[in-house]
Amino acid sequence: MKTRRLFRAAAAATCGALLLAGCSAGNPGTSSATAGPVTTTWPDPGAGLQGVTLTLWMSTQTAAMADNVIKAFEAKTGAKINKVVIPDVYETNAPTKLATGAKPDLATWQPTGSMLSLLKPATDLQSLDGAPWLAKQTPAIQKLGLVNGHHYAAFVNVPSVLGVFYNKSVFQKAGITSTPKNFNELLSDAQKIKAKGVAPFFGAAGDQWPTQWWPQVLLAEASKKGLWERVSQNKEKFTDPEILGAVRQFQDMVKQGLFNKDDKTSKYTESGPALLKGEAAMVLQLTSFASLMQSTADTATIDREIGWFPISKDGNIATSVPGGDNALVAFKTGDPKRESGARQFLRFWLETYYPDYVKSAGTVSIEPTVPAPAGVPEVVKQASAALDDAAGSMQQNAAVNPDFYVNLANMVNGTMTPEQVTSTTQSQFAQLAQALGIQGF
Amino acid sequence: MLYPSSFLAPAFAVLAVFFFLPTVFNFVYAFTDWSAFHDDIRPVGLANVKAVLSNGALLSSLRITIVYAVLVAIMQTGFGLGLALLLERDTRINRFARVVFFVPVLMSALAVGYTFQALLKPDGPLNGLIGALTGQHVTIPWLGSTTWTVVTVAFVNSWKWMGLAMVIFLAGLKTIPADVLEAARIDGAGRWRTFLSIRFPLIAPAVTFNVATALLGSFNGFDTILATTGGGPAQQTEVLDIYIFRVYGNGLFAQATTMSLALLLLVALLAFPVIGYLRKRERVL
């Protein structure tokens, strides 16, 4: 009897203590001890790192992008890079893993303000201010990957911009001789193509996320005038005329039948072949769409068949959306050796190894002194050049990233009106902004 | 007493750490501002409850979850019973068929989901087969209807688990005493009458188990739906677990926890009357 009472008391005390510990604890995996002054030392890229193991998290899309760099870094320094591929959806699963206390030394990550905020940059990420590679990169890149004026993302390749990829033969058959100079011209070209029995645009609402690009390109000029900053300060809302108007315009396009018939169930991966085959005349997508086309066609075919132009409401402004394959972040782990090793790895990638990386990846260089290799499709070069004058997307310039695309996909499916899309998105935005502690929400 | 009760301590410690504590924390975190955006966790009272209730998405997800679970319970039990009756006799072919129908139970739910996603595409093999049989070009978007896709994903899940229901029904059917069935046959009862009046009432425990596990288990439906539709089209298959996953992925951990609490309450509220009713049916035994 006595034993039982003792056991009960011990069990209750243990549970109570654990419960209290849980209540008073911070987020798992974070510690105030890891927050410190901005790092200033930048180890030599080729310095010996025997006995140091760095963990690198990557998404399934970026799984192979660093393989050659890792091999070269390991051979040069003696360090070991432990590559961990986090399953899709990376942007959801990686923060979930972080919340459980796991923390890598490096990770590929979407280098936008809203996505970086998910990683608590001020306390959990290494600041990359003053990194030696920054001065070597193009001015446009140097302005990206910032949170509160600090660099937290190391860009390894050119950020994606939004633009229209078009099938040149379809345009020719529809009698279109030059690319549209604004959105109204784009719509009138779309009608000409529709009259020929071809879907003007390939939408992939089955994947939901591609839907958000249409309102965003319609808001490029407004973005340049500080739209997303005003939205982030709660001075303007999704329900106000500017964003609501863009959503309505997108709905009009859907209602006019300007998209492929199976838009509601189509997937992103189907849009590349559809454009190349001329089943659809245009695809509004990120620069990385070129990689999708390259998986089924060679560069010569893409250059011959496909053209590219940026579009916005009143002109040809591109919209930049840095993606998860564009940059890496380095975490504060509390282990100075590994933190320094992570900075060294980034230096090695972006300085010593960069010409080789650009060559093996067949990508446009973001360092003016490093020439672009042969075999990069013309459309990628054009899209990269448009970055200089590009407007920021919601992901890039707004403080948080609500599920705008989910609501827009609902609208494409006919279950939400533009008013419901904007009001639901606004309330999601406010919830996220409140969680982030932004004034005004 | 052979052993002192303190020998139970390790088992209870494991139970407390891996079962009791997470459940308690589910309650605790629901009333905090735990998120991906800051380190500290502060109590916020009922703010999360208000936030999730103010958003129509929670109620919509709950409605979809209930519809999905009821559909799965009906289909899975129905398919399982049908298969058990069909394969009841212990012939070599039947034994082989039982194994074949049990294989999906052992398969990964994600693999099943992705396979069906490919099968059900507008230009997929199913439409191809229908087209070949009818001689017409068929492009039915099986996963594109905002009304019927929930039925399709419930079917996919029921297909995966029907082998388990079949095994449980077979076990139930095997326990029916042969003399009872013989007496029915002598009394002149046909196959249908025997099934309705003798066999079905006597497998009531199997019905209870199958309906309860299919219905209550489907409230936690996630993997098959994620792989088949991802919650679409237009969130019409976004059951609560997928919605919670999305909110959690957005960094709103405490709100996701509040929603999981809502799910826990819903399951608890439904479990007692459903199991109570089904157990009452067994009293005839």
Image (cartoon, coloured by chain):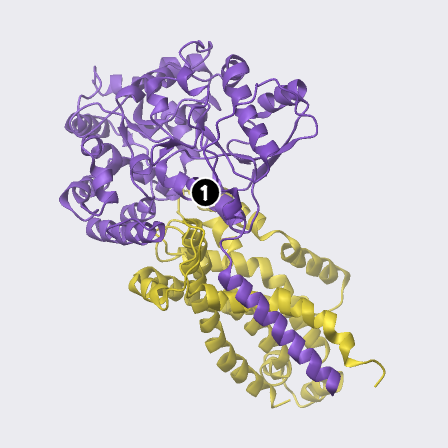
Chain colours: A purple, B yellow
Along the horizontal axis of the image, is A11 left or right of A87?
A: right
Residue drawn at x 48%, y 34% is A126
In the rendered structure, which amino acid carries the disc numbered 1?
A: Thr
Q: Is residue A281 visible?
A: no
Q: Chain of mark 1?
A: A
Element marked by disc 1: helix
The percent position of residue B46, horizontal first and vertical second, equals 35, 68
Query: Dot 1 corresponds to which residue?
Result: A123
Residue drawn at x 46%, y 19% is A132
Badge 1, how many Cα within 10 Å: few under 14, some, many 20+? some
The percent position of residue B234, horizontal first and vertical second, equals 34, 51
Nearer to me, B93 or A258: A258
Position of the N terminus of chain A by quadrant: bottom right
Q: Is residue B210 visible?
A: yes
Nearer to me, A210 or A234: A234
Q: Most extreme residue toward the right, as rendered?
A: B2
Residue drawn at x 42%, y 40% is A122
Residue drawn at x 53%, y 54% is B223
The percent position of residue A215, horizontal first and vertical second, equals 24, 38
> Count the marks: how many?
1
Classify A250 as above or below B142: above
Q: Most extreme residue toward the front, as rendered?
A: A37
Classify B175 as above or below A263: below
Along the horizontal axis of the image, is B271 left or right of A138?
A: right
The percent position of residue A88, horizontal first and vertical second, equals 51, 42
Nearer to me, B69 or A183: A183
Nearer to me, B284 or A365: A365
Classify A379 as above or below A190: above
